[in-house]
C-alpha cells in the first residue's frame, strides 16, 4: 500500500472523535463514493481498541508497536509499523497499540 497523502472530494466530520482522555483523536471522512474512513493521531500511550468492522490501519507518520488478538482469543506478538506501512484487523476483534516518542498519524480504512 502506498502512503496516502490526501483525499480529494470528501466530506469531513468537524467534531473530533476523542478516545482515551485525548490520547487518540480522529475525524471521520466520507469519500464521494460513500466509502468511510477516519484520519487521526495517537499520542504516546499503550491503548486497546475493539473493532466492529474489519480495518486497515495505515501509518502516515511516526511509528507504533501493535499486537493483534488471535483466533484463539490470545494476543499475538508485537510488530512495529511506521509511515507507509499498514496492518489489518479483523472484524469483531481487538488490538493493542503502543506509541512511544513522536505521535503516530494514521488513516483507518473500514470494511
Image (tube, rainbow, N blue to C red):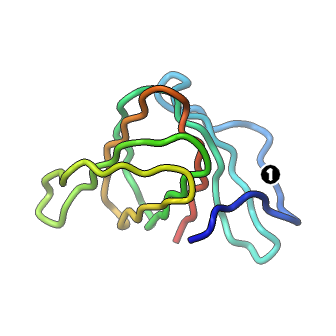
**Quadrant in the rendering for residue 104:** top right
Quick one: which residue is furthest to the top in this view?
21
Task: Identify the element where label 1 is drawn.
Answer: strand
Which residue sits at x=47%, y=26%? 101
Residue at 55 percent of width and 32 percent of height:
103
Q: What x and y, as percent, mark residue 83?
A: 56, 51
Vertical order, 8 against 38 (above or below): below
For residue 48, above or below residue 75 = above
Q: Which residue is mark 1?
A: 12
Q: Is residue 67 left or right of residue 89?
A: left
Please state which of residues 100 and 27 is positioned toward the viewer in this rendering: 100
Q: Which residue is at the front of the view, 6 or 50?
A: 6
Q: Residue furthest bottom?
A: 33
Residue 17 pos. (x, y %)? 62, 38
Q: Which quadrant would the N terminus be assigned to in this image?
A: bottom right
Q: Nearer the viewer, residue 3 or 24?
A: 3
Amino acid at each position: 500500500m502506498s502512503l496516502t497523502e490526501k483525499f480529494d472530494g470528501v466530506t469531513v466530520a468537524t467534531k473530533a472523535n476523542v478516545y482515551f482522555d485525548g490520547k487518540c483523536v480522529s475525524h471521520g471522512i466520507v469519500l464521494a463514493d460513500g466509502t468511510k474512513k477516519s484520519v487521526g493521531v495517537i499520542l504516546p500511550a499503550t491503548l486497546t481498541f475493539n473493532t466492529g468492522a474489519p480495518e486497515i490501519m495505515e501509518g502516515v507518520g511516526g511509528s507504533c508497536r501493535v499486537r493483534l488478538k488471535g483466533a484463539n482469543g490470545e494476543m499475538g506478538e508485537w510488530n512495529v509499523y511506521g509511515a507507509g506501512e499498514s496492518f489489518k484487523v479483523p472484524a469483531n476483534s481487538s488490538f493493542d497499540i503502543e506509541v512511544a516518542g513522536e505521535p503516530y498519524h494514521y488513516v483507518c480504512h473500514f470494511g
